[in-house]
Amino acid sequence: MSVEAEDAFRKELVELFVQEAHEWLQQIHVALDELQQAPESDRHRMLAQTIKVGITNLGGSAATVNLTDVERASFSALPFIEALQDPSAPISADDFLTVCKQLGHIHGALTRATGVTFESTAQQGNQHSLSPTIPMKELVTRLQGLQLKTSSSRTVPRNIIQTMVAQAEALMQHGSGHYQVASIQEFLDRSAEGDQVFLTLVQQQERHLTGVLRALTASSTQIVVSPSDLRTAAERVEQLWSAAQQVNASHAMMFFRGLHSFLTIVLQQRVVISPRSIEAVILRLTQCVKAIEEWVESGRIERLAIQGAVCH
């Protein structure tokens, strides 16, 4: 391979790494936000594992493209991440601050190594120190009042307000008296981005999955879909389930888990399904996508209400 070709290949690898790094950091920050809200034990373990896996993937991928500083910063953060794994162990606000600082080191290393701006968590903290604050008790009161107003009018339930109340109450228990308004806006922005990424992925995969399912109805006596197509469809559904888990869309998680089991049975046992049953599955998929769209819209409305009550 010529020097020019080798340089072009490495540039392409780094560009792919940058894209992956942004995705992993998005997942890590969303999980860390929710972890601070004192979730139930099982959810706590899942969120902590998401953060650990994201950091590990980031460090491992950095090693493959010889970004040593990023690799070092990532793996140096693991001991601090592991300290959050046990839901029964008390976690202080300082523990979360330490993890945020470690993430800031990773952001800085990424920016220096790739030339792409990764906003540092530490820089965010400095910006927050100059931003307005709201007393924690006042924040909880406003959010609880907003929750009463919106609960009766929502057709698709979301728990963004409830999540923020739980987070604020947990911080109060750790001695925090004020909440940075900029932190609230960041949480809402990340929530909105997570919703949109999830919805876009679902919409992109719906057509492919519908096509595979319709192909199963081509014959009532034999399966005409190739094993590789069924396997690909099952993998895409698994990806959708994982994406639903990241945004805590429990209704979508249940559907995609069931669809994955269905496709796996057809693939492994080569079971012929009646056209009526296939049409029922396709209808359920359509309904699920519609429900996700409504779920995302409900989240958008709830975030706007929070911004109006708290951020202005």
Image (cartoon, rainbow, N blue to C red):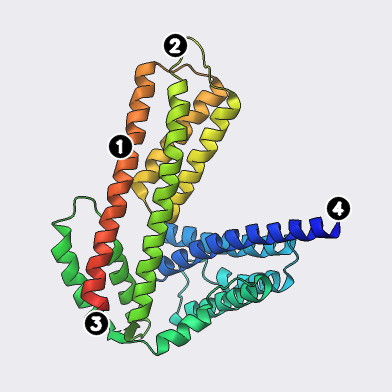
Count how many numbered circles sit on residues in the image.
Answer: 4
Q: Amino acid at mark 3?
A: Lys
Pointer 3 local density, CA inside 10 Å: few below 14, some 14–19, many at least 20 = some
Q: CA distance from mark 2 to mark 3?
A: 63 Å
Give the left or right position of residue 283, taking residue 209 as reference. Answer: left
Sequence-first disc among 4 and 3: 4
Label 2 sits on residue: 220
Residue 7 location in percent, x, y?
A: 78, 61
Pointer 4 local density, CA inside 10 Å: few below 14, some 14–19, many at least 20 = few
Pointer 2 local density, CA inside 10 Å: few below 14, some 14–19, many at least 20 = few
Residue 258 location in percent, x, y?
A: 42, 35
Residue depicted at 59% across the width and 58% down the height:
20
Pointer 1 local density, CA inside 10 Å: few below 14, some 14–19, many at least 20 = few
Sequence-first disc among 2 and 1: 2
Sequence-first disc among 1 and 3: 3
The answer to which of 10 and 230 lies nearer the viewer is 10
Residue depicted at 39% across the width and 55% down the height:
196
Q: Is residue 70 above or below residue 53?
A: below
Q: Which mark is residue 287?
A: 1
Q: Nearer the viewer, mark 2 or mark 4?
A: 4
Label 3 sits on residue: 137
Residue 118 occupies quadrant: bottom right
Q: Helix, strand or loop at disc 3?
A: helix
Q: CA distance from mark 4 to mark 1?
A: 51 Å
Q: Amino acid at mark 4?
A: Met
Tag 2 and tag 4, C-beta contact below 8 Å: no
Q: CA distance from mark 4 to mark 3?
A: 64 Å
Label 4 sits on residue: 1
Residue 48 visible in the snapshot? no
